[in-house]
Image (tube, helix red, strand yellow):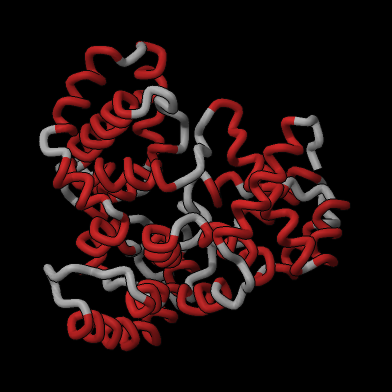
Amino acid sequence: MTTAPSLRLQVLGFAFETPESQTQHEHFMSIYTSVLVRRSMRWSLSFPVGERLPHTRKLKRFCRKGIPNDRRAEVWMEISGANAKMRINQGLYKRLLEEGRKKYHATDMEQIELDLPRTFPDNLYFTGKDTGATQIGILRNILCAFAALRPDIGYTQGMGFVAGICILVMKKEETAFFLFATIMEKLPNYYGHGFEAYKVDFRVLRDLLRQRQPHLAEIIEKSQIPLETIAVKWFLNLFFDVVPIETMLRIWDCLLLEGDKILFRASLAMLEMHAVDVVAARQMGEHEALMATKNMGKEVFDCHAFMRHCFLIRPLSRNMLRTARAAKYAAMRAGDES
């Protein structure tokens, strides 16, 4: 008689959803660990700890192949520009936190308090007896300070997931805040009023899918698959709770250096690699199709293969996205929702 393996934890202290997902992950890691060791050695030789990281093709190539876990905090802060912002804004976080606590609107603070315990309910560090209250307090502080920094955005449900990942990777409150604020600055205003920026980018994504995979796009559009609802987590959560944590971190490695192009690449890769699941879902009702397709990334443990697929998606340039977004903004404001 075989017994189920005891549930361990993923990177950053997240629980596996099922014993089967843990088994899949362990099988992949038995193959992938040697790759991680080689990559770590190459990072140490090419980009020694503490040295400047010039934005070169070599750095881009290394980030696309994955930043070692023990270097991720340092490298993210440098490649995103958050380090530079923190250096020239000494004392800003403390001032923003004080201002946020004084001025924050009670209803907004109430929403934050409601969302805090729901942010990472299966994370060791956010629910642990010794660490949970501390991590929740840091998350509260960062969201409050950001609302003071960007009153035009304030707080919107979903931000906590992005801020929480920053906390878990950075491990220091002020650096986590500056990384979070930098990410929010780099992204379109997905959290703004009416989620207009997300609606625009979803329509850009839909057009890209029509160009690359017209048959798959037609199936989705003619079926009960609510892709616009599913893709919210791809853009607003930056793939948290969409793919396994290791795969999500690999997406962020590229996001922080290259910008939000990677969100389109990863979204297209998700649909193309799970075309069979999408086709199967067209026979389902809307609720069943939603449940089947929103979970299709949960078993993307082979982060290496997923990222390789992302970068097979060409051409996809910043200029292309800028032009496509401008066209969609104009169309939406003219009342054209296509």
Viewer-closest of 323 and 138: 323
Q: Is residue 236 left or right of residue 112?
A: right
**Could you tell me which residue is drawn at 24 percent across and 56 percent down?**
77
Q: Image quadrant of residue 74?
A: bottom left
Viewer-closest of 205 and 144: 205
**Could you tell me which residue is drawn at 60 percent across and 52 percent down?**
322
Viewer-closest of 178 and 251: 178
Viewer-closest of 30 and 331: 331
Q: Image quadrant of residue 11?
A: bottom left
Say which quadrant the C terminus sits in. top right
**Could you tell me which residue is drawn at 17 percent across and 32 percent down?**
92
Q: Image quadrant of residue 330?
A: top right
**Could you tell me which residue is drawn at 40 percent across and 30 percent down?**
115
Q: Position of residue 271 (x, y in %)?
A: 67, 64
Q: Position of residue 65 (x, y in %)?
A: 39, 77
Q: Position of residue 169 (x, y in %)?
A: 26, 55
Q: Is residue 260 visible?
A: yes
Q: Is residue 245 left or right of residue 53?
A: right
Q: Is residue 219 above or below residue 150?
A: below
Q: Position of residue 175 (x, y in %)?
A: 19, 47
